[in-house]
Image: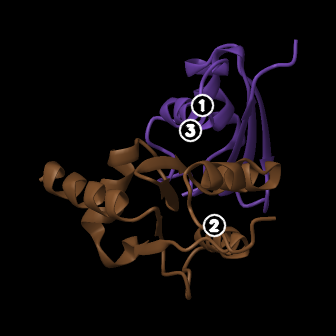
Amino acid sequence: MPMEASDIIKFIKESIPDADVHIEDLRGDGDHYAATVISASFEGKSRVAQHQMVYKALQGRMGEELHALALQTAIPKS
Amino acid sequence: MENIIFDRIRKEIENNDVVLYMKGNAIFPQCGFSAAVVQILSQMGVPFKDINVMEDSEIRQGIKDFASWPTIPQLYVKGEFVGGCDIIREMYESGELQEMMRENKVPMENAA
């Protein structure tokens, strides 16, 4: 079941308000996305913990409605 | 119920240095993300135990709960969850994965 890129951004921003989110629809099918999420709240966290924060923001949709989301997280460069 | 599954997972990741929970097996991966991690480990020459979650629905769900991680594949080194496909790829490209294997004294045939 496809999911809109705008919904992905909305969910992430609801949970990580300062997040800078870029989404790319890899195949144009609303089902395979690549996301870059940049947030100061990732500071001091492991990559696994950063990705877990994003997955948590998606409230269980990852792996369900959202089949594929290649994820990259980063801390803003000051 | 959850404890039995978690115990099985714990036993696997404690008894094997490198464990990959994946869709399909190392020879016939059934998903591109799983295949990508198999390819990276093979390129590094790291021996690993592959566990096909498609053959066991309890493990398929259990491993997601175990790591609080919604997707397969999942790579474990010395009992610790390292990441899924994106993280492994990123760590491999930056050399961190090789570094981590070295630190954990995991044998690598191609330690470049």
Q: Is residue A68 above or below residue A15?
A: below
Image quarter of residue A28: bottom right
**Residue hosting label 1:** A46
Please give the name of the residue rendered at 57% of the width and 53% of the height, measured from the top-left corner: B84
Q: Is residue B40 above or below residue B84?
A: below
Give the alpha-carbon distance from disc 3 to disc 1, as whole Å. Answer: 5 Å
**Residue hosting label 2:** B37
Question: Residue B94 at what x, y percent from top left?
Answer: 81, 48
Please give the name of the residue rendered at 25% of the width and 64% of the height, measured from the top-left corner: B58
**Residue A44 visible in the shown view:** yes
Question: Residue B57 at what x, y percent from top left?
Answer: 29, 68
**Residue hosting label 3:** A48
Left or right of A50 in this view: B91: right
Question: Residue A26 at what x, y percent from top left?
Answer: 79, 57
Give the alpha-carbon distance from disc 2 to disc 1, as whole Å. Answer: 20 Å
Q: Amino acid at mark 1?
A: Ser
Q: Amino acid at mark 2?
A: Val
